Amino acid sequence: MKNIRFIAFGFLLTAAMLVFGNSALLAKESKKEQTQKKKEVSRLEALAKFTKVISIVEKYDVDEVTIEELIDKALKGMMSNLDAHSAYLSEKDFNDLKVQTDGEFGGLGITVGMREGALTVIAPIEGTPADKAGLKAGDIILKINDKSTLNMTIDEAVSIMRGKVGTPIDLTIVREGESKPLQVHIVRGIIKIDSVYEKRIGDDILYIRITSFDKKVVKGVKKAIKNASWAKGIIIDLRNNPGGLLDQAVGTVDLFVDNGVVVSQKGRYKQDDKVYKASTNATITHKPLVVLVNGGSASASEIVSGALQDHKRAILVGEKTFGKGSVQVILPVTKKEAIKLTIARYYLPSGRTIQAVGVTPDITVLPGEVKTHKNEFMLKEAELKQHLKTELEKIDGKKKNTKNKKEKKEKIITQEQLQKDLQLKEGVDIIKALIITQGAK
């Protein structure tokens, strides 16, 4: 009888616990459902508010604006307020974006970004109309023709600056060190990007200039290195390189690093997290390396320079980089329109971020010329000898192959050119020291 009571009591206790547990679970589920319902109500209220504002503007605005135009304006405003790099892409914007990485497009030849709300030149592309007109990294564009850039999005600015080849455009810029805004007149042209070219410094230094990271960079850098078996050290110039394709940045680092993380990206969702690693098979050289950077080095340039710095594979020389380390993806809205949305941020192998911080060089060197004392007599003597040599060749009937000499000269950086580029001169001095201490491998 006693056992029966204990069994009955145990049954009742278990039943009570189950009831209590189920009640707690129901209460928990109820709270979850309540939170979800509140979110849904809030969402519907927000959408209703948006629809109401659109209707009021459409009905009462002094200018007659269609519902399609209002929606486009609303989307542009929403995307530009998320961050400096997100944007709504109209049909024209979408088409323009598709041609940017093909290596040829029309325009001025500058890459722009937003810095503290101001439309800023990240870098002029070498050899383009903007470069020839004297635009510099860090210039703030105050006006495009007579239109103020305040409250203008990057895509709006780019759309205005692009135009028919041969047509003029005037930019009003604010430049550090200048007492008043400068007027820059530029004629639009076809922008052809020679993304990689190489030169020789002295007997044993290979200089590689990367102007932007388009789809030809890894192939170009690899070819330059393989053709320079004589080189004992390498200088990579990323100054005023505005960035480009991520796979080309990763591939460039992979040419110099055996293994390990090159860059990682982390977003809101796990599926947006990615890690890009170097592989031994892709590495083609272990020779001493110096990388030149400045305030015009951005995005992919910062990934390459920062990764090489973290792997202790290169010495960075120059100035702090721009600080653009976010990941944008293009998400189609219709067949002709899309949005550019920031979904993640880049992180270097050490875990540090690039966004709004940039990469600090190992050795800071400001741009400028090397001050030297010239011996005027020696210069005049050398000029006289060269003149007499030319006159002698005329008498002897010898013809100089000027084409070959010009091509050879273009492939060599002279001592005189080094004296005019303090950052490059410092890079050369460092690479010479590395060659002595490390040796060529």
Image: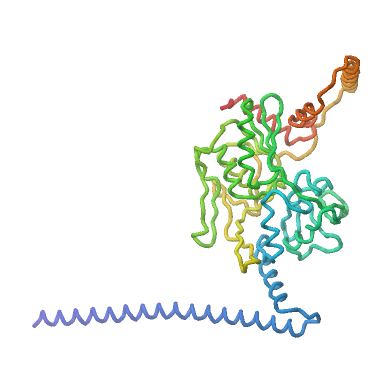
Quadrant where the C terminus lies?
top right
Q: Nearer the viewer, residue 382 or 294?
A: 382
Residue 377 makes an appearance in the image: no
| Residue 2 vertical placement versus 336 (above, below) | below
**Which residue corresponds to the image point at 63% horizontal and 36% vertical from the top-left?**
315
Q: Please count the marks in the image.
A: 0
Residue 132 makes an appearance in the image: yes
Residue found at the very far left of the displayed protein: 1
114 left or right of 330? Answer: right
- Where's residue 288, x and y in %? 60, 31
Q: Quadrant of residue 200?
A: top right
Q: Nearer the viewer, residue 326 or 159?
A: 159
- Where's residue 78, x and y in %? 67, 70
| Residue 225 vertical placement versus 193 (above, below) | above
- Where's residue 394, x and y in %? 90, 18
**Which residue corresponds to the image point at 80% horizontal and 80% vertical from the top-left?**
63
Q: Quadrant of residue 46?
A: bottom right
194 left or right of 374? Answer: left
Quadrant where the N terminus lies?
bottom left
**Which residue corresponds to the image point at 51% horizontal and 37% vertical from the top-left?**
258
| Residue 118 vertical placement versus 333 (above, below) | above
- Where's residue 340, x and y in %? 64, 62
Q: Nearer the viewer, residue 5 or 382?
A: 382
The structure's colour scheme is rainbow
Q: Nearer the viewer, residue 3 or 307?
A: 307
Q: Quadrant of residue 20?
A: bottom left
